[in-house]
């Protein structure tokens, strides 16, 4: 499957919202917005990301379908990457291919990626792209309404 990244367009936002309604995906991601069912709040948040010059936000196209998104941002004084993939694209190498393409756009190093302690799929994506586990932390996971373990990965 051919993977392409492009800037996020307004027409992608309803697809991203629909992808964020998957209960299993929310559980796995764990660190989500407080209310992922609030479409207006999520669209407003994503619209801000699209206009913020320090944030790089990309749509992942798998063939001609919107498969998900990637984002580069700064948090905790670290340059971070994050991604979300619709369930139909899980387990097909789409996230790994997309993240590799995204990393080629980003000259900044080191880069960090974070996952819930039990999100093995996301951990594998980061590791396949050269990230290594550097820390274990805890944080409040909105999707689980609890504090959980979080792994921090780093790419030098």
Image (tube, rainbow, N blue to C red):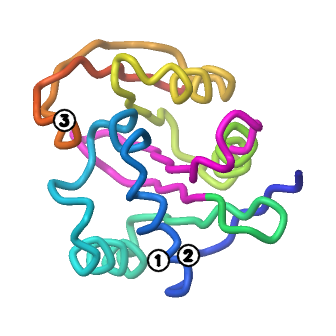
Q: CA distance from mark 1 to mark 2?
A: 8 Å
Reply above or below: 41 against 85. Answer: below
Tag 3 secondary structure = strand
Whether residue 88 is in magenta: the answer is yes
26 relative to 41 in the view: left or right: right
Whichever of callouts 1 and 2 sits on the residue coming sooner in the sequence is 2
134 relative to 138 in the view: left or right: right
Number of residues whose C-alpha sits closer than 10 Å to that of mark 3, classed few (under 14), some (14–19) or many (20 or more): many
Q: Position of residue 101 (x, y in %)?
A: 73, 49
Whichever of callouts 3 and 1 sits on the residue coming sooner in the sequence is 1
Q: Nearer the viewer, residue 128 or 107?
A: 128
Seen as rendered, the residue at the extreme bottom is 10
Q: Which residue is pictured at 24% across the width and 81% down the height?
A: 40
Viewer-nearest of labels 2 and 3?
3
User: Which of the 4 image quadrants contains residue 46?
Assistant: bottom left
Question: Which residues, given as a range, are shown in magenta?
Answer: 68-94
Q: Which residue is tagged 3?
A: 141
Q: CA distance from mark 3 to mark 1?
A: 23 Å
Quarter of the picture containing the C terminus is: top right
Whether residue 111 is in magenta: the answer is no
For the residues labelled 3 and 1, say whether their Cβ atoms are less than 8 Å apart.
no
Q: Which residue is pictured at 41% across the width and 64% down the height?
A: 55
Q: Which residue is tagged 2?
A: 8
């Amino acid at each position: 499957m051919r993977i392409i990244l492009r800037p996020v367009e307004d027409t992608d936002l309803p697809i991203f919202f629909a992808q964020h309604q998957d209960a299993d995906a929310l559980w796995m991601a764990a660190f989500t917005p407080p209310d992922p069912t609030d479409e207006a709040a999520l669209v407003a948040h994503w619209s801000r990301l699209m206009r913020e010059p320090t944030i790089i936000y990309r749509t992942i196209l798998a063939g001609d379908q919107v498969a998900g998104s990637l984002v580069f941002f700064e948090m905790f004084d670290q340059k971070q990457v994050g991604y979300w993939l619709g369930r139909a694209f899980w387990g097909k190498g789409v996230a790994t291919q997309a993240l590799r393409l995204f990393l080629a756009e980003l000259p900044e190093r080191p880069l960090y990626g974070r996952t819930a302690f039990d999100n093995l799929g996301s951990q594998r994506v980061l590791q396949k792209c050269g990230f290594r586990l550097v820390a274990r932390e805890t944080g409040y996971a909105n999707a689980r309404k609890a504090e959980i373990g979080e792994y921090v990965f780093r790419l030098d």
